Image (tube, helix red, strand yellow):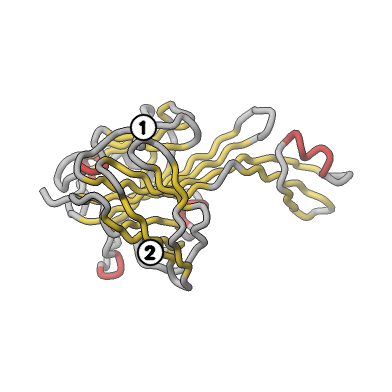
């Protein structure tokens, strides 16, 4: 079990976008010592942590190299329960594997007592809404799913915040997370620490435990969530943020991320 004294907890239930099927990326290795090594990457949408349920398309899977450049991942296979990619890591440093949806806008409205939806932002919706539409609302949505893999020496380029949407930063490099040592995560929205981000922390082996050991959390006023992992192995963070906004394109914003990482033996 995790040390709860170090947790920033919330009694609130996580949002439906997080509690539904969770899409995760799990590389076969998080730390390597040989250049030009190949790794396998499993991807699935599932209810149980790292127990595959539904295969997904990997057309948007990208590899960000230690210099920050993006490469398409082309050696992929989509199965019924999970999908897989083969990826070669050419040189030293930290890489980021990422699947991200671009910004999308959904406008919902009510017409004749029925709730309907169309894909349009606030500027586009005017021409598309039918006469008599009421309770009109536009939501900006985006999701990211990622993991870091390090070859020999850790580097920081692909770990740095991009300043757009919901992102995670940490006081510890992803290649240096160790069991029994505190890990502090900061959830940032558009480059700034964000309070009120809700999520779930889980770790592998749920299928073989009576107690899944999941921890629900909500970030504090500094956007922080801290915990001390008691077990080495693979962990999953699922998080989401939703808020009213007042922009030219949307009335609300909804962002979500999933992040898998490895905890090493002490």
**Foreground residue, 228 or 70?**
70
Where is residue 224 shown, x and y percent of the image? Answer: 33, 33
**Furthest-right residue in this view:** 131
Residue found at x 14% / y 45%: 180
The percent position of residue 240, horizontal first and vertical second, equals 47, 44
Number of numbered discs present?
Answer: 2
CA gap between label 2 and label 1 equals 29 Å
Residue at (40, 47) in percent of width and height: 63
82 relative to 40 in the view: left or right: right
Q: Nearer the viewer, residue 250 or 82?
A: 82
Along the viewing direction, whichever of 198 and 162 lies nearer the viewer: 162
Q: Which mark is residue 195?
A: none
At a point 27% along the width and 38% down the height, the residue shown is 226
- Where 33 sits versus 7, above or below? below
| Residue 233 in view here | yes
Counting other residues with Cα less than 10 Å from the Cα at mark 2, is it few (<14), some (14-19), or many (20 or more)?
Answer: some
Q: Secondary structure at mark 2?
A: loop
Name the mark nearer the viewer: 2 or 1: 1
Residue 141 in percent (x, y) is at: 58, 43
Element under disc 1: loop
Question: Can residue 12 be seen by looking at this rendering?
Answer: no
Q: Is residue 42 above or below residue 120?
A: below
Q: Which residue is mark 1?
A: 160
How packed mark 1 is, by other alpha carbons closer than 10 Å (few <14, some 14-19, many 20 or more), is few
Position of 55 relative to 129 (above/below): below
In which quadrant is the N terminus drawn? bottom left
Residue at the spot 89% in from the left edge and 44% down from the top edge: 131
Residue 29, x across and y down, in percent: 26, 56
Q: Earlier in the sequence, mark 2 or mark 1?
A: 2
**Front-lying residue, 88 or 80:** 88
User: Which residue is label 2 attached to?
Assistant: 48
């Amino acid at each position: 079990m995790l040390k709860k004294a170090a947790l920033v907890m919330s009694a609130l239930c996580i949002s439906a976008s997080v509690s539904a099927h969770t899409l995760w990326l799990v590389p076969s290795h998080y730390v390597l010592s040989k250049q030009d090594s190949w790794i396998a990457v499993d991807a699935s949408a599932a209810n149980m942590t790292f127990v595959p349920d539904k295969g997904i398309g990997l057309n948007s899977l990208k590899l960000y190299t230690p210099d920050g450049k993006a490469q398409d991942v082309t050696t992929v296979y989509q199965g019924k329960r999970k999908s897989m990619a083969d990826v070669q890591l050419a040189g030293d440093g930290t890489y980021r594997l990422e699947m991200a949806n671009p910004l999308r806008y959904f406008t919902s409205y009510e017409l004749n007592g029925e709730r309907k939806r169309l894909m349009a932002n606030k500027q586009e919706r005017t021409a598309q809404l039918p006469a008599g539409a009421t309770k009109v609302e536009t939501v900006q949505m985006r999701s990211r799913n990622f993991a870091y893999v390090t070859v020999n020496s850790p580097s920081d380029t692909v770990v740095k915040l991009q300043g757009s949407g919901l992102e995670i930063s940490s006081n510890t490099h992803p290649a240096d997370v160790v069991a029994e040592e505190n890990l502090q995560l900061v959830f940032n929205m558009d480059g700034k620490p964000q309070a009120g981000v809700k999520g779930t922390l889980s770790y592998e082996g749920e299928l073989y435990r009576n107690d899944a050991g999941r921890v629900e959390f909500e970030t504090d006023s500094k956007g922080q969530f801290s915990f001390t992992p008691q077990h080495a192995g693979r962990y999953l963070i699922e998080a989401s943020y939703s808020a009213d906004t007042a922009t030219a394109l949307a009335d609300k914003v909804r962002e979500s991320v999933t992040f898998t990482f490895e905890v090493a033996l002490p």
